[in-house]
Image (cartoon, rainbow, N blue to C red):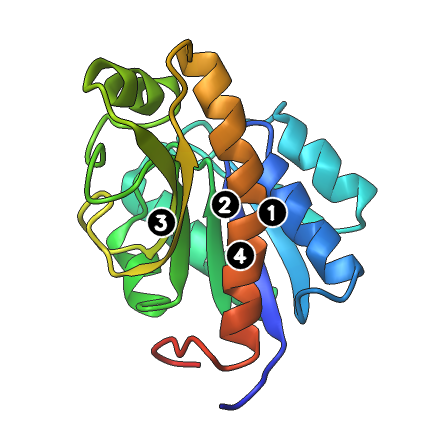
């Protein structure tokens, strides 16, 4: 196993609590990582404030700044490259990555999904919708899945999963809160395993 420092680029859309959890893990020495840049498609998202407080570079890149999808894709790649990013972490990013970004960082883009894939994944399955679907299906457990990102939603290789129970009186919100606690743990832990070489990613 070969250890290495991860130079992390984040893509996020909203609050960024998983970004914060990973920043904290880096600061506390639980993850040998260096957060380099946060790219967000929402110019007033809380995640940008989190990044600025931590001294991390931020960029707003979206269809507002780059109406052409190809130009947006190119701008995302250029931003990640200019910050010497070697691992890309999606944290509640509500847009599909473009082909240029996926090609340049093939095998080095991670995402976290708030269910136990392959169940309750795919296009349109994000946020509260996932938890509503879990409850509607009568599942006894849910959880979080860290996986590699490919050009198909939620289809990439699974790197880690952690389960939580579904309680009889759960609502989508209460289940979401329980899953989010696990997300904050498992995402940083999985990245730490990449950094210490126990998970090997293509190109690292």
- Alpha carbon separation for disc pair 3 and 1: 15 Å
* Secondary structure state at the residue bearing disc 3: helix
**Label 3 CA crowd tier, 10 Å (few <14, some 14–19, many 20+):** some
Instruction: Give the side of residue 67 with respect to residue 123, left or right.
Output: right
- Alpha carbon separation for disc pair 1 and 4: 10 Å
* Secondary structure state at the residue bearing disc 2: strand
Q: Residue at x 58, y 56 (%)?
A: 188
Q: Mark 2 or mark 4, which is nearer to you?
A: 2
- Does 202 sit above or below residue 147? below
- Alpha carbon separation for disc pair 2 and 1: 6 Å
Q: Mark 2 or mark 3, which is nearer to you?
A: 2
Q: Can you identify the residue that label 2 sits on?
A: 11
- Alpha carbon separation for disc pair 2 and 4: 11 Å
* Secondary structure state at the residue bearing disc 1: strand
Evaluate if marks 2 and 1 touch, with contact meaning CB atoms under 8 Å apart. Answer: yes
Q: Residue at x 64, y 34 (%)?
A: 47
Evaluate if marks 3 and 1 touch, with contact meaning CB atoms under 8 Å apart. Answer: no
Q: Can you identify the residue that label 3 sits on?
A: 73
**Label 4 CA crowd tier, 10 Å (few <14, some 14–19, many 20+):** some
- Alpha carbon separation for disc pair 4 and 3: 10 Å
Q: Residue at x 34, y 55 (%)?
A: 147
Q: Tell me which corner region of the image, top left, top right, bottom left or bottom right, holds residue 192.
A: bottom right
Q: Can you identify the residue that label 1 sits on?
A: 38
**Which mark is on residue 79?**
4
Q: Earlier in the sequence, mark 2 or mark 4?
A: 2
- Alpha carbon separation for disc pair 2 and 3: 12 Å
Evaluate if marks 2 and 3 touch, with contact meaning CB atoms under 8 Å apart. Answer: no
């Amino acid at each position: 196993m070969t250890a290495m420092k991860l130079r992390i680029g984040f893509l996020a859309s909203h609050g960024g609590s998983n970004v914060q959890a990973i920043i904290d893990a880096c600061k506390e020495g639980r993850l040998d990582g260096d957060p380099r840049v946060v790219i967000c498609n929402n110019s007033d998202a809380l995640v940008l404030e989190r990044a600025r407080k931590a001294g991390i570079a931020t960029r707003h890149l979206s269809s507002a700044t780059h109406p052409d999808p190809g130009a947006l894709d190119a701008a995302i790649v250029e931003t990640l490259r200019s910050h010497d990013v070697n691992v890309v972490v999606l944290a509640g990013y509500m847009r599909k990555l473009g082909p240029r970004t996926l090609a340049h960082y093939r095998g080095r883009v991670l995402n976290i999904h708030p269910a136990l894939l392959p169940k309750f994944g795919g296009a349109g399955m994000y946020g509260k919708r996932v938890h509503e679907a879990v409850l509607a299906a009568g599942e006894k457990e849910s959880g979080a899945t860290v996986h590699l990102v490919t050009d198909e939603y939620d289809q990439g290789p699974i790197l880690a999963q952690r389960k939580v129970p579904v309680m009889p009186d759960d609502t989508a919100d209460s289940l979401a809160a329980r899953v989010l606690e696990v997300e904050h743990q498992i995402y940083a832990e999985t990245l730490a395993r990449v950094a210490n070489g126990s998970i090997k990613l293509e190109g690292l």
